[in-house]
Amino acid sequence: MEYLSTLNPAQRNAVEHTEGPVMIIAGPGSGKTRVLTYRIAHLIKNGVQPHQILALTFTNKAAREMKERIKAIVSGSEASNIWMGTFHSVFARILRVEAERLGYPPGFTIYDTDDSKSLIKSITQGMGLDDKIYKPSLVYNRISNAKNNLISAREYLNNPDVTFEDRSSGKPKLGFIYQAYEERCFKSSAMDFDDLLFKTNVLFKNNPDVLYKYQQRFKFILVDEYQDTNYSQYLIVKKLAAMHQNICVVGDDAQSIYSFRGANIQNILKFEKDYPELSVFKLEQNYRSTKNIVEAANSVIKYNQDQLKKSVWTENPDGERIKILEASTDNEEGQLVANKIFELRMQNQLGNGDFAILYRTNSQSRTMEEALRKRNIPYRIYGGLSFYKRKEIKDIIAYFRLSVNSNDEEALKRVINYPVRGIGKTTIERLEVLADEQKVTLFSILEQCNMVPYFNAGTSKKLTEFVYLIKSFKAQMNKLTAYDLAKHITTSSGLMRELETDKTPEGISKIENIEELLNAIQEFTDGIDENKEEPLNRNLEGFLQDVALLTDADESDKDGEKNKVSLMTIHAAKGLEFPCVFVVGVEENLFPSQLSIGTKEELEEERRLFYVALTRAEKHLFVSYAQNRYRYGQIHHAEPSRFVDEIDERLVDKPISSGYNNSNFFSGGFDDERKQNWGNKNSQKPTLTPTFPKPSLPKNLVKMDQAIKQINSAATISNTDNEPQQSLSEGMNVEHQRFGKGKVMLIEGNLSDQKATINFDIAGTKQILLKFAKLRILD
DNA sequence: CTGTCCTCACTTTTT
DNA sequence: GTGAGGACAG
């Protein structure tokens, strides 16, 4: 058991205490994943069969990583027999096996959020409701909320509290929309994300024999990030663990930041109530951050009342104090951050990949990006459109879905006229009416459309052709491999031809994305992907079952992405760590968000979010704010966040501002007001006021300062972007985000339509529209 | 049916 | 300021 010797006493106890209910409270950087993986490995080493272990995570990434790490200790085949995956994927798997019990086919479709919203929209329209009042996203949230709390549509309608709430908010029809939504999903043989958990609960409730089967199977259950579970997940876990009581939950209440998605922090705070025999282990030693960072985070989180007692500490050196950056505007904040990165990279021999910029809202990325671009610092934004959410991918997958499950209405509506086959809105509406009248699916109306006198010969022919197309795909489902069929569908659906006509960079990139998808399918077909347990069926249906629950395409590991500054929301940063972290936009009404200061609970969640942000840093931590910020196109005055003041002042270095705040950067009427606020702020907040004379800036900094001033004034006067491509000329060497290095051969067109022909080393000659291309000039 | 202009709304989002 | 979706004209 040599693997145990690398653990500290608390970690080791948590690993070795395998029987009975266990709660592991794991502070940030305390080796949580290590404990979880070792615990599972330990179980297997002690004779537990891997298939008796159920390990639930929230993300595919977490499951993947854990599996990898377990493989390093036990054998690969053992590791792959563990029931390890996200809540959604594990229960989707079970639901497919037990689908019959719920009246669903095993090949049911999983609707993503877009499908759900589009279905809701079609329902509200059908009911003649105003979709300004019944906004799809609002309705979706409401339904999601109900499902996460295990309230069915029927119960929703019968619940006086809920219906009263809806009536007083002017949306009395919500319950009926929910009901229709439920029916339409069922008719389409589809489940949404929440259904995967909701219906698992229904399955277990209505089928005690099924529950019993899984209770017996899963002798050991582990749940990661338990603080983020919702009621639906809580109940599934509780039911499954009821027989053996070998339930181990791991989490950190201080990092619960997903209540808006239904996560209930009380699940972890009140865990002991369900299991009086509970053993609690606290992992309090932090291996990630310097003492100053750990203590700064502690000093902030202690303002929260609702929390489990623990004290995070570290043996790491003190390190630097936390630095506060004060900027007069959001743009300047970006420049300050970019300069700091530039400076630290030199001084501390850090690479770009060692830096992260964390913000509260996605919209804050823009100013950061601009500043980084100006300084030629490569960066990567996390959390953009994920691969499987891109239109071209969704389109082709809709064809796959429809071929597997022809009841899938959302897929049908997506592709029936894409590529264009002359089946217009009117026709589709008529089809929907017919389907509704006859209480059958859209597809079955299509199948009989040539017999029905509702459509003229032309339309009828088009519809029939479409049906034959899909049916021909269906017929080959079990004859061709996933890859062969996918390739066949992309061409014979006409989708590929459609995309090939588009010669713009976006069009090219779309084709590349389709090719990437086909590669993924090929890998699936060949069984290269080791993460897949028993390759049940390697046909397209099998692939589709996997893909619905994937959100990222693992992009982070690819092509040199590693040496870039990471930009992301704090939510997206959870679980990550970086040597140097900038938490930006730490201002009242932004962080904490204006929308989250209404209640104590909301504010505490914001504070936990700030705690998460601070604890991402290993060595260097910067907190920045701007005194003025553009929001919705208008400049707004901003106060530093209360959270800044909550950091123990002994751990903080006074604000570093750019030193030219008093220049006439602003020449508007509100100059006075701003100065006044400044004065006030300083007198109110002594912690932020320099207590000793400001040291003069080092020489190189002074220069840099002047440089920013120039950039700044240039930007203010002309207000045009200093985009590198403006100075692009023929013969230059450039680097493109996707195509790599190349030489500019020709520039043509003017202004916004300027086009360049670039000869790329690897990708060959491409025509690129400069307004879209992210080109970096190399010389 | 498609393209263009205009209006509107706008935290966070593991699945 | 920005992007998405709706209205309306061609």
Image: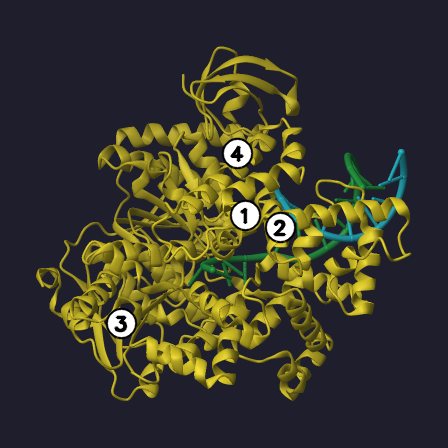
Chain colours: A yellow, B green, C cyan
Q: Residue at x 49, y 73 (%)?
A: A98
**Mark-to-mark CA distance, 2 and 4:** 28 Å
Give coordinates of residue A521: x percent, y percent: 47, 44
Residue at (48% x, 69% y) in the render: A97
Local secondary structure at mark 2: helix
> What is the distance, in whole Å, between disc 2 and disc 3 at their CAs?
52 Å
Label 2 with label 1: CB-CB less than 8 Å: yes
Mark 3 surroundings within 10 Å by alpha-carbon count, few (fewer than 14), some (14 through 19), many (20 or more): many
Label 3: which residue? A25
Instruction: Give the chain letter at badge 2.
Output: A
- Callout 3 secondary element: strand
* Residue type beneath disc 3: Ile
Do the residues under discs 2 and 3 have CB atoms within 8 angstroms?
Answer: no
Residue A491, x across and y down, in percent: 62, 36
Q: Give the crowd class for mark 1: few <14, some 14-19, many >=20 residues within 10 Å.
A: few
Q: Earlier in the sequence, mark 4 or mark 3?
A: 3
User: Badge 2 is on which residue?
Assistant: A475
